[in-house]
């Protein structure tokens, strides 16, 4: 093979290797957390926090929030519903819902139906035989520090006494029986911005 042909092949190979679009650099990572405390409500309206029983972390990057929760000391072999609420830990408000008054049942999260009535409906955490529970979730319905409707900073993550069938509540034929949705809050914590250095 002539030297000119070899050089041409090498040049074409170099161009083909360098012409591919480089992998884009990921956007800034924003971190938040929530220390979860046992809560009690002597008057049924306001809450008092007790000892720490868990810890939640939120990592937001490129439009996606990754949420992780670890709890301990709970009643073994149980399940508990979790929601993000407005207000404060001491005086919780309504469910957080991106400032909207519409159901999120048909909204998409990560390319799949959310199938929960509110944007702040987290899901059920399963507790094992030793009283420990873990929960993980990724969603593009939440953000951290964006200061728009999807920003969950300042919301309160509440854990309830009983589990909840979120998908059933999205059924148009679902009927709300009196007292059926009474579900005491037993633990909670406020979502706050985390330090830049985050040890997981």
Image (cartoon, grey):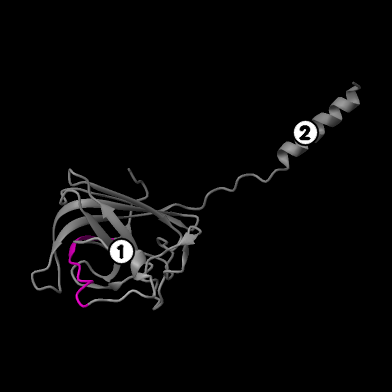
Residue at 90% x, 21% y: name it.
1
Residue at 77% x, 33% y: name it.
13
Q: Is 62 displayed left or right of 193 in the figure?
A: right
Task: Tell me where residue 19 appears, x and y as whole percent.
Answer: 73, 42
Residue at 42% x, 61% y: name it.
143
Most foreground residue, 68 or 21: 68
Circle number at residue 165: 1
Q: Is 154 displayed left or right of 162 in the figure?
A: right
Residue 175, quarter of picture: bottom left
| Residue highlighted by disc 2 | 13
Is 174 included in the stretch rendered in magenta?
no
Q: Is 75 displayed left or right of 16 in the figure?
A: left
Residue 182, quarter of picture: bottom left
Secondary structure type for disc 2: helix
State the CA–CA distance, disc 2 to disc 1. 57 Å
Secondary structure type for disc 1: loop
Residue 42, quarter of picture: bottom left
Is 189 included in the stretch rendered in magenta?
yes
Q: Which residues are magenta?
A: 178-190
Q: Nearer the viewer, mark 2 or mark 1?
A: 1
Most foreground residue, 62 or 123: 123
Q: Are marks 2 and 1 in contact (CB under 8 Å)?
A: no
Q: Residues within 10 Å of mark 2 (few under 14, many from 20)?
A: few
Task: Tell me where residue 88 appears, x and y as whole percent.
Answer: 23, 69
Which quadrant is the C terminus positioned in? Answer: top left
Q: Residues within 10 Å of mark 1 (few under 14, many from 20)?
A: few
Nearer-N-terminus badge (2/1) = 2
Q: Is 164 displayed left or right of 43 in the figure?
A: right
């Amino acid at each position: 093979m002539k030297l000119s042909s070899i050089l041409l092949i090498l040049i074409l190979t170099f161009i083909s290797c360098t012409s591919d679009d480089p992998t884009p650099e990921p956007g800034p990572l924003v971190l938040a957390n929530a220390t979860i405390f046992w809560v009690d409500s002597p008057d049924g309206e306001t809450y008092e926090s007790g000892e720490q029983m868990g810890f939640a972390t939120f990592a937001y990057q490129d439009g996606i929030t990754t949420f992780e929760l670890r709890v301990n000391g709970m009643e073994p072999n149980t399940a508990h519903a979790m929601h993000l609420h407005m207000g404060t830990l001491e005086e919780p408000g309504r469910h957080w819902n991106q400032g909207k008054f519409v159901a999120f049942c048909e909204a998409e999260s990560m390319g799949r139906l959310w199938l929960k009535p509110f944007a702040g409906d987290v899901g059920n955490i399963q507790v094992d035989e030793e009283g420990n529970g873990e929960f993980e979730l990724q969603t593009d319905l939440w953000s951290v520090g964006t200061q728009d409707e999807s920003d969950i900073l300042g919301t309160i993550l509440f854990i309830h006494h009983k589990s909840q069938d979120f998908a059933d509540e999205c059924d148009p034929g679902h009927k709300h029986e009196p007292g059926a949705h009474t579900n005491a809050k037993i633990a909670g914590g406020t979502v706050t911005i985390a330090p830049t250095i985050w040890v997981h």
